Image (spheres, rainbow, N blue to C red):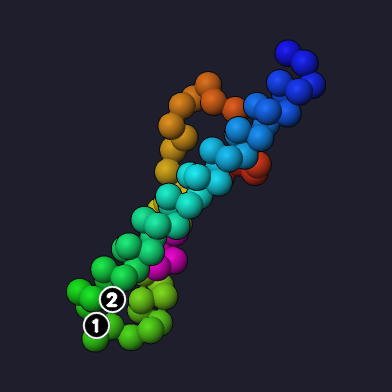
Amino acid sequence: MGFKEAMLQRNQELIDQFNRDEQLWHRLQWRKVNRRVRFPKLGALSHAILDLGDEMRERRRPADCVGRKWIGKRP
């Protein structure tokens, strides 16, 4: 594999990581909005704590594939 192919592969990995992060953001936003519609009387602090809980659960999800190369920091 030459330099050009390695750079293209690295770029594709970064694009894939960006797409995964964007999908995560959309999932979290959907939960956040849905929770505020379902429980409007909860205070701002309660909503913030529940939002952080959602983020922590998403971060601790297991990797999809064991043989996959890590990109960036490990969870």
Q: For residue 17, what is the image quadrant?
A: top right
Up the image or down, 16 lies above or below 50; here it is above
Q: Nearer the viewer, residue 31 or 19?
A: 19
Specify whether 34 is left or right of 27: left
Q: Check disc 1: other Cα within 10 Å, few if <14, some if 14-19, many if 20+.
A: few
Residue with the mark numbered 2: 36
Residue 40 appears in the picture as rendered = yes
Please state the horizontal and vertical placement of residue 54, each as a whole percent of the image.
38, 60
Check disc 2 and report its element: helix, strand or loop: helix
Marks 2 and 1 close (CB-CB < 8 Å): yes
Question: Bounds of the magenta span?
Answer: 51-55
> Above or below — where is 55 with respect to 5?
below
Horizontally, is 43 left or right of 74 in the view? left
- Please name the residue shown 36% across and 76% down the image: 47
Residue 75: percent from left, percent from top? 56, 44
> Which residue reaches farthest left?
38
- Amino acid type indicated by mark 2: Arg
Which residue is rendered at x = 27% and y = 71% of the image?
35
Residue 40 - label: 1
Q: Where 17 falls versus 1 (above or below)?
A: below
The three-letter amino acid code for the residue at tag 1 is Pro
Instruction: Name the residue located 53 percent from the left edge and 21 percent from the top edge.
Output: 67
Residue 6: percent from left, percent from top: 72, 23
Q: Does residue 20 show up magenta in the picture?
A: no
